[in-house]
Image: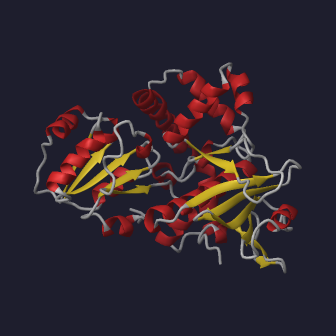
Amino acid sequence: MIQRFLEPYIKEFLNEKIILITGPRQTGKTTFSKSLDKNHRYLNYDDTTHRHAILQKNWDRKSSLIVFDELHKMKNWKQYLKGIYDTEGTEPAIVVTGSAKLDTFRKTGDSLAGRFFKYRFHPFDLKELIADNPSLNKKETLNTLLQIGGFPEPFLKGTDRFYRLWKQSHNDVILKEDLVDLTGIRHLSDIETLIQLLRRRVGSPISYASLATDLQVSPKTVKTWLDVLENLYVIFKVTPFHKNVARSILKEPKYYFFDVAMVENNEGSRFENLVALSLLKELHFWEDTEGYETGLFYIRNRQGQEVDFLLTKNNEPFAMIEAKLSDSSPSPHLRYFSKFFSNSIHKIQVIKNCEAASSYPDAIHIAPAHEWLSTLTFE
């Protein structure tokens, strides 16, 4: 099993806090959680027998670890965990996994405050794969991620055919089970159409009004559906950065997929999605293991000048990233927007088809994607 970056950080607090692990379906959350301790008890709220045991709080107290899966589907799940924690502590240790954003379901209040640490699982990225196996060919691994994405099962199988079959069942579970169970939304064909529209618009600012026209619904409905897809870890949003940037566009986010291979077969858009997902994973890692506040944005002004990504740490911009397939000449937009930030901001142009790194007097760094994404360093 590929060792996940989060393992030592989760083990550090396993016997002190309730551990909440969220992320897209089939990113390895359950397999990882079970591997934390061989003497574990696994209870899935979707299973009728398991659900009865959960409701009765009936399990072997000699187990070292209890893994609750999909517990957020239970009414008042936070009070339930609070009661266990306050009366029994973390003996056994408690791990809760879920394929939706657990912090979205706050109807019962923040009753777990001070009792849990939250961690977000992502699909494999180049950095995690190379750290586990440094002998991997970085270029070939990058191409595999672009072709079939980083979800563990299809990635490890490594074939287009298996990915296509896996994707069908994966999407069916999300749309026909999770979406209905957690939201009550039953416009499945419209949601499927929305996903298809997004697949063709990765990397472009999204107009709610334009999507509403295509789907024959209101912009408010489109916004609600997009929020739901975000909460189910199908897509993630990158909003425009506007602080200190003159004449910036203050609306129209971009949307990217957690499954890179979902992007319609456009090499440039798919590569940009992969870079976006790698950056998001790194920022989530910083937040979940070190407690930093981070943000992933893009920059664009009304003249159409644009930089793909701007990263912030504790509300301060620290890096601008431009993703290119082949163009190794420094982006003039990186240079233009540099004047709005401190001289210390990192300016990195990540290029897929590039063999050697280089830099320029104005500190723009040209980085081959297979090298830079395998380390994600900003020095």
| Snapshot quadrant of residue 142 | bottom right
Can residue 133 be seen at all in this image of the molecule?
no
Q: Residue at x 34, y 38 (%)?
A: 108
Viewer-proximal residue, 76 or 170?
76
Q: Would residue 257 appear left or right of 120 to someone viewing this image?
A: right
Position of the N terminus, as image quadrant, is bottom left
51 over 116 or under it: above or below = above
- Asked if residue 329 is positioned above or below residue 240 in the image, the reply reads below
How is the rendered protein coloured?
secondary structure
Q: Quadrant of residue 92?
A: bottom left
| Position in image of residue 3 (x %, y %) | 41, 66
Which residue ends up furthest to the top in the rendered image? 216
The image shows residue 50, relative to residue 273, as above or below, that is above
> In the picture, which quadrant includes the C terminus?
bottom right
Q: Is residue 164 visible?
A: yes
User: Residue 276, image x and y in percent?
Assistant: 64, 55
Residue shown at the point (73%, 23%) measured from the top left: 213
Q: Left or right of 174: which side holds 325?
A: right
- Give the residue drawn at x 71%, y 72%: 346
Q: What residue is shown at x 66% (from left), y 22% (from top)?
A: 218
Q: Position of residue 323 (x, y in %)?
A: 74, 59
